[in-house]
C-alpha cells in the first residue's frame, strides 16, 4: 500500500518520549511517555523498557507523572505528580510491585528538581510555594464571598517566567526530604532568584549548590558561585572561583573534585561565548578549564517541534577519570567523552540528535533519546559495540512505528554556501538544508519557504520537524539554515551578531535567498519566509530590506528592541549583550533602534501573517501589535492571529494540541494563498 503525505492531524497520534534514566544495574530505562487524548490534553506517565525492548507502564491516569528517578539501589522510583487534590507532590514507587506512596505533604506550589542522595535516605528537591493570595483555597474563599481576584504585588524585576506564569516574590528553596518519614526540611534559600543547580556529595553528607552571588543579578554582571551545604543548613562558599556563569555542578566519585559548566566572561549574559567544562577542588581554589583548546560549546540546543531543545547531559564516568557530555555540532547532537587530562572525543557519529540522560553504575551504558529528521525520537541506550569498539545507540522503543509505516516524509539534503567575510575578514560558510516536496518531479518549479530559527543562539539540525514535513507535503520546497549567531559552529561564528543583530545574520539570509532564486526547482517569484522568536525578528528584518519574498509569517516575534528591553521576562542588562537600554541616553536608544526591524517598516510590501500568544512573556505580544499596526497603516496585506493568554512562547512545540493544529492550518493557508 502506497504511503500518504503527512497531515497536521498526525500530531494527535505522535508518542513523545523524554527524560531517559537508566537503572543502576543498566538493565532498564525509565522515561516519560506523553500522548494526546480525545479531550485535547497531554497525558504523561512513566514507563520502562528493558534492553530486549519489553515495555512496562508504571503510573496511570491523566493527572500526570514525571521526573522519574531511580533510587541508588534500584528498589524504588521517585516521581512528581499532582494526582491528589491537584497539588504537586513527591511520590515513591517500589520496583518490585505495589502502589505508589505519597512522600511529601507540601503546600500548593511547584516542585522543580529532585535528586536522591547516594545512600538513598534523602531526596533533595527545589520547591516554590504559590502566591498565598492566588492559591486554590484563597480563590475558593473569594468565590464564596463574591470578591474580586486580588492584585499581584511585586517588588523585584524577576517576577514571571514564560510557560511558568507569575510568581511575584515567591522563590524556589532547597529542601531535603526524608525517604522513610516524608518529612521535609528547609536547607537553603540564599539566592534572590531562587535559581539553584545542585548535586550530592558521594558520602551523602553535603550538597554542592550553584547560585548567584550578587543581590541584583538582573542588573549586575554574571557572578554565579559554588557553595557547600551540610544537612544542618550550614553553608560556605568555595573561594578562588572566577565570576561569570556556572551551572550543573557534578561531584567526582571520590569526592575530591567538583566539575561544572561555565564561562568567565562577565559581560555575556546571553551566551555567545562557548560554555566550557571546569574543574575545581572540592575545598575550593583555582578552577581549571578542561576544554580551553576546544571550540565545542556545552550549551548547544538543537531545535525541533516534537522535542525539547535539550542542551544538557553532563556527568562523571564512574571511574572518575573523565566526563560524559552531550555535544551539539553542525546540526547534530552526539555523545562525547572528556578525560580530565585530555581533549573531547566524540564517541558517536551520524546525522541524528542524541539527548543523553544518566549513566549506569558501571559506566557501560547511557540512557538516551535518539531521533533524526525523518524519525521521531525513541528511547535508546548507548554502549560500546564489542566487535568494533565504537559507541552506538541501540533503539529500544518503537512507539511511532505505525505512523512511520503509513506516512511518506521528505529527507533533507544538506549543503554549504560561501557567505560574506566575518568582521575580522576571515571567510565564513553557511550550513543549509533543503527539503523537496513529497512527490517531487523534475523539471517542475515549486514554491519555496525559508524557515529561520529562534534563539538566536541555538541550531537547526537533524531533528524531526512536523511543521517542515507538513509544508513539504503541501507542495513547498523547505529551506533552513544556521546563520551567524547560531550555536554549533564555534565561538567566533556565534559572536558575529553580539550587540549587532541585522548585519552578519542578514548577510547570510541574503546568501541563501540568492541561492534559492537560482535553483531550477524553485520558482523565484513564489518564495516565502517565516520564523519564530528571533526567527520572527529576522523575518521582520527581511521584509523591511527586500522584496524577494511574496509572503511572510512572523511568529512570536521581536520587532522593537527599545520596547523589548523593558517587557521581556528576562530583564535586559544595560551595556552587556546589547548596548544601551530604553531608559538610557539618546545615543543608547539610537543603537537599539538601529537594530529594530520596525524602524524599516516603511519599506515593507510583503503580505504578512502575524502570529502571537497573549500569554507570551518572552517576547511580549506588543511586539506583534506594533508589526500589525504598521502593516495596516502602510496598506500591506496582513492578518493577525492572537492566541489566548493560556498559551505561551512555546505554543508551537508544547501548546494546547487544538491550537497547535490551528496554527499549522493558518501557516499552510497563508502560504497557499500567496505562493500558489
Image: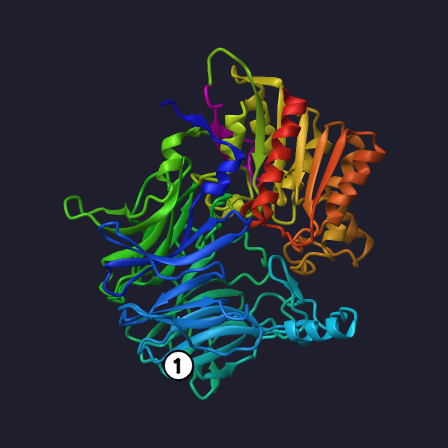
Q: In this picture, which residue range is highlighted in magenta? A: 416-439
Q: Whole-percent x and y of residue 81?
A: 47, 66
Residue 212 vs 344, above or below: the answer is: below
Q: Is residue 195 visible?
A: yes
Please report the residue visible at 70 percent of the width from the left and 34 percent of the height from the top: 609
Query: Residue 413's image quarter?
Result: top left
Which quadrant of the figure contains the N terminus? top left
- Residue where numbered disc 1 is placed: 206
Pick whichever, 360 or 653, lies toward us: 653
Label 1 Cα neighbours within 10 Å, binned few <14 / some 14-19 / many ≥20: some
What is the residue that sits farthest to the left in this orientation? 387
Q: Is residue 505 above or below residue 146?
A: above
Q: Nearer the viewer, residue 486 or 13?
A: 13
Determine if the magenta segment contains residue 221.
no
Please provide percent x and percent y for residue 539: 66, 36
Q: Residue at horizontal 75%, vertical 32%?
A: 638
Q: Residue furthest top?
A: 443
Instruction: Residue at 50%, 40% (x, y): give it.
Output: 11
**In the visual, does 427 lie left or right of 206?**
right
Disc 1 secondary structure class: strand
What percent of the width, then of the height, locates residue 253? 29, 71
Which quarter shows the C terminus? Answer: top right
Q: Measured from the top left, where is residue 441 in percent x and y?
A: 46, 14
Amino acid at each position: 500500500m502506497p504511503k500518504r503525505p503527512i497531515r497536521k492531524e498526525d500530531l494527535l497520534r505522535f508518542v513523545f518520549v523524554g527524560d531517559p534514566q537508566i537503572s543502576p544495574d543498566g538493565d532498564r530505562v525509565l522515561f516519560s511517555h506523553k500522548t494526546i487524548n480525545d479531550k485535547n490534553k497531554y497525558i504523561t506517565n512513566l514507563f520502562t523498557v528493558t534492553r530486549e525492548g519489553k515495555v512496562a507502564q508504571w503510573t496511570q491516569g491523566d493527572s500526570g507523572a514525571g521526573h522519574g528517578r531511580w533510587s541508588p539501589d534500584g528498589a524504588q522510583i521517585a516521581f512528581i505528580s499532582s494526582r491528589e487534590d491537584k497539588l504537586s507532590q513527591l511520590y515513591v514507587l517500589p520496583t518490585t510491585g505495589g502502589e505508589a506512596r505519597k512522600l511529601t505533604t507540601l503546600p500548593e506550589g511547584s516542585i522543580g528538581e529532585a535528586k536522591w542522595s547516594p545512600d538513598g535516605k534523602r531526596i533533595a528537591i527545589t520547591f516554590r510555594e504559590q502566591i498565598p493570595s492566588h492559591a486554590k483555597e484563597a480563590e475558593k474563599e473569594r468565590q464564596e464571598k463574591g470578591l474580586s481576584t486580588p492584585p499581584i504585588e511585586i517588588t523585584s524585576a524577576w517576577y514571571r517566567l514564560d510557560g511558568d506564569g507569575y510568581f511575584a516574590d515567591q522563590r524556589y528553596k532547597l529542601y531535603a526530604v526524608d525517604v522513610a518519614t516524608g518529612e521535609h526540611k528547609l536547607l537553603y534559600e540564599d539566592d534572590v532568584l531562587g535559581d539553584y543547580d545542585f548535586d550530592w556529595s558521594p558520602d551523602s553528607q553535603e550538597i554542592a549548590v550553584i547560585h548567584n552571588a550578587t543581590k541584583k543579578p538582573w542588573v549586575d554582571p554574571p557572578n554565579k558561585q559554588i557553595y557547600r551545604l551540610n544537612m544542618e543548613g550550614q553553608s560556605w562558599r568555595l573561594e578562588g572561583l572566577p565570576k561569570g556563569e556556572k551551572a550543573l555542578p557534578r561531584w567526582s566519585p571520590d569526592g575530591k573534585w567538583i566539575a561544572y559548566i561555565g564561562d568567565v566572561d562577565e559581560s555575556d549574559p546571553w551566551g555567545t561565548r562557548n560554555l566550557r567544562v571546569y574543574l575545581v577542588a572540592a575545598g575550593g581554589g583555582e578552577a581549571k578549564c578542561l576544554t580551553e583548546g576546544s571550540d565545542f560549546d556545552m550549551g548547544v540546543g538543537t531545535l525541533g517541534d516534537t522535542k525539547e531543545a535539550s542542551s544538557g547531559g553532563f556527568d562523571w564516568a564512574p571511574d572518575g577519570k573523565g566526563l560524559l557530555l552531550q555535544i551539539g555540532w553542525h546540526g547534530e547532537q552526539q555523545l562525547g567523552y572528556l578525560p580530565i587530562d585530555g581533549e573531547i572525543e566524540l564517541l558517536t557519529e551520524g546525522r541524528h540528535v542524541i539527548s543523553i540522560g544518566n549513566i549506569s553504575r558501571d559506566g557501560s551504558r547511557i540512557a538516551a533519546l535518539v531521533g533524526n529528521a525523518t524519525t521521531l525520537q525513541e528511547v535508546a541506550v548507548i554502549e560500546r559495540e564489542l566487535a568494533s569498539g565504537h559507541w552506538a545507540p541501540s533503539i529500544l522503543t518503537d512507539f511511532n512505528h505505525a505512523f512511520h509505516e503509513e506516512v511518506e516524509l521528505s529527507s533533507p539534503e544538506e549543503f554549504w554556501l560561501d557567505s560574506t567575510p566575518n568582521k575580522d575578514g576571515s571567510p565564513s560558510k553557511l550550513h543549509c538544508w533543503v527539503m523537496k516536496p513529497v512527490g517531487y518531479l523534475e523539471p517542475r518549479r515549486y514554491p519555496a519557504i525559508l524557515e529561520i530559527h529562534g534563539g538566536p543562539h541555538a541550531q537547526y539540525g537533524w531533528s524531526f520537524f512536523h511543521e517542515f514535513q507538513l509544508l513539504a507535503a503541501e507542495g513547498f520546497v523547505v529551506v533552513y539554515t544556521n546563520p551567524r549567531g547560531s550555536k554549533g559552529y564555534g565561538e567566533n561564528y556565534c559572536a558575529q551578531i553580539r550587540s549587532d543583530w541585522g548585519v552578519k545574520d542578514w548577510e547570510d539570509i541574503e546568501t541563501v535567498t540568492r541561492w534559492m532564486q537560482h535553483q531550477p526547482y524553485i520558482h523565484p517569484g513564489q518564495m516565502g519566509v517565516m520564523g519564530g522568536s528571533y526567527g520572527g525578528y529576522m523575518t521582520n528584518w527581511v521584509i523591511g530590506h527586500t522584496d524577494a519574498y511574496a509572503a511572510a509569517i512572523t511568529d512570536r516575534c521581536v520587532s522593537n528592541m527599545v520596547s523589548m528591553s523593558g517587557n521581556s521576562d528576562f530583564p535586559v542588562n544595560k551595556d552587556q549583550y546589547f548596548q544601551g537600554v530604553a531608559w538610557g541616553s539618546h545615543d543608547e536608544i539610537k543603537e537599539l533602534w538601529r537594530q529594530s526591524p520596525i524602524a524599516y517598516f516603511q519599506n515593507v510590501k510583503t503580505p504578512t501573517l502575524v502570529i502571537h500568544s497573549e500569554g507570551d512573556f518572552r517576547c511580549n505580544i506588543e511586539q506583534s501589535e506594533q508589526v500589525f499596526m504598521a502593516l495596516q497603516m502602510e496598506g500591506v496585506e496582513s492578518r493577525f492571529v492572537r492566541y489566548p493568554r493560556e498559551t505561551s512562547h512555546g505554543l508551537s512545540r508544547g501548546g494546547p494540541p487544538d491550537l497547535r493544529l490551528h496554527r499549522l492550518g493558518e501557516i499552510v493557508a497563508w502560504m497557499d494563498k500567496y505562493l500558489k
